[in-house]
Amino acid sequence: MQTLAEHLEKHVEDPALRHLINSFAYISLDAQHHFPKYLRGTLGDRNKYGEAVAQLDSWVNGYLCDSLVKTGVVRKIYSEELDSPLIATSQSAPFVVTLDPLDGSSNIVSNNAFGSIVGVYREDLPQKGRKLAAAFYKLYGPVNTFVYTVGKGTHEFVKHYDSEGKAQFMLLAESLSLPEPGEVFGIGGDPLSWEPNFLKFAKDLFRVEKLKVRYSGTFVADFSQVLHRGGIFSYPATKKSPKGKLRLFYEAQPMAFIMEQAGGASWSGKESLLDVEESDVDARTPLHLGNSYLIGKLKQACP
């Protein structure tokens, strides 16, 4: 079985990028060991979006940010949980990072799956998603999985203990490809606030495409369902959130990069999420990810 470090050595030319990807996989694993201490409750504070901050959100953000800076290859971090970017001491470090430290934190109290999402750029934001050097996510589920891309396919690793009892990330699937035509779908938001054309499209996922509903409230977990089983995940514009709910830089662009590298497609309602040009690093966007066939059907239904 191939380790993450061995896979990176073979497929990623830049040693600094190899170091960052491998480091984050184990940083996030170390962070998980502390989760039980911060599992319940909120701090009484709200983040820059006005959302209540869970104790675990706050702690994980601090731990991941501090650890990423210590890698020596990150000069700036944009995080959903930071009011302003964290600027590292070493401004000669090669990478700028976007971070959703704990995607799906509303699922903490029910002990459902949640995860962490990272985007890596060489230049400062704002940048189109096409400029991503790498994207990866960690899913804290029944087992720990780590998925990354550097633009040479999407690859998945699983935590495994070696003969000495040491945790290693071992290759589970190389060059993932979405099954066709797709099996599942998940859609966020209130159906009563969806646009009529989108509501009809959603109904047709049942009636015509015969897909099964899978929606957990954690973007990473629902994305992983689509990645492995094929289908579509959407969080459309709604009457309440006409610009969408998910954040372009922290969530949409990294996951669109991973999806498109697995043979799927992404759409903002106008163009690929990797082609969206936006000056506000906290901007939200309608988001649609999945099999190219289903994204094509969506484009026809909601021109």
Image (cartoon, rainbow, N blue to C red):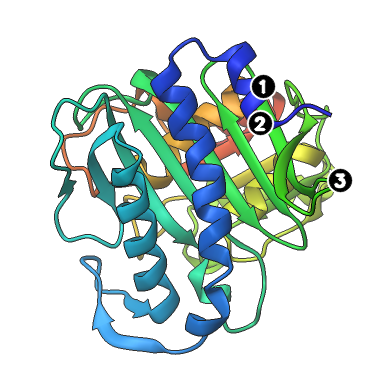
Locate residue 276 relative to residue 123 in the image: left or right: right
Q: Could you say which is closer to the camera, residue 221 or residue 11? A: 11
Name the amino acid, label 3.
Lys
* CB-based contact (under 8 Å), mark 1 and mark 2: yes
Residue 151, given in percent of the width and then of the height, sits at: 53, 16
Q: Decide: few, some or many residues near mark 3? Use Cα within 10 Å; few <14, some 14-19, many ≥20.
A: few
Closest to the observer, 151 or 280: 151
Q: Residues within 10 Å of mark 2 (few under 14, many from 20)?
A: many
Q: Position of residue 115 (x, y in %)?
A: 56, 57
Does dot 1 land on a helix, a strand or a loop? Answer: helix
Residue 239 position within the rendered picture, expressed as x and y whole percent measured from the top left: 37, 61
Q: Which residue is mark 3?
A: 210
Which of the 4 image quadrants contains residue 75?
A: top left
Provide the residue designation for mark 1.
Answer: 7
Q: Amino acid at mark 2?
A: Leu
| Image mark for residue 4 | 2
Marks 1 and 3 in Cβ contact (< 8 Å): no
Residue at image coords 41%, 65%:
60
Vertical placement of 123 versus 63: above or below? above
In the figure, residue 277 lies in which quadrant?
Answer: top left
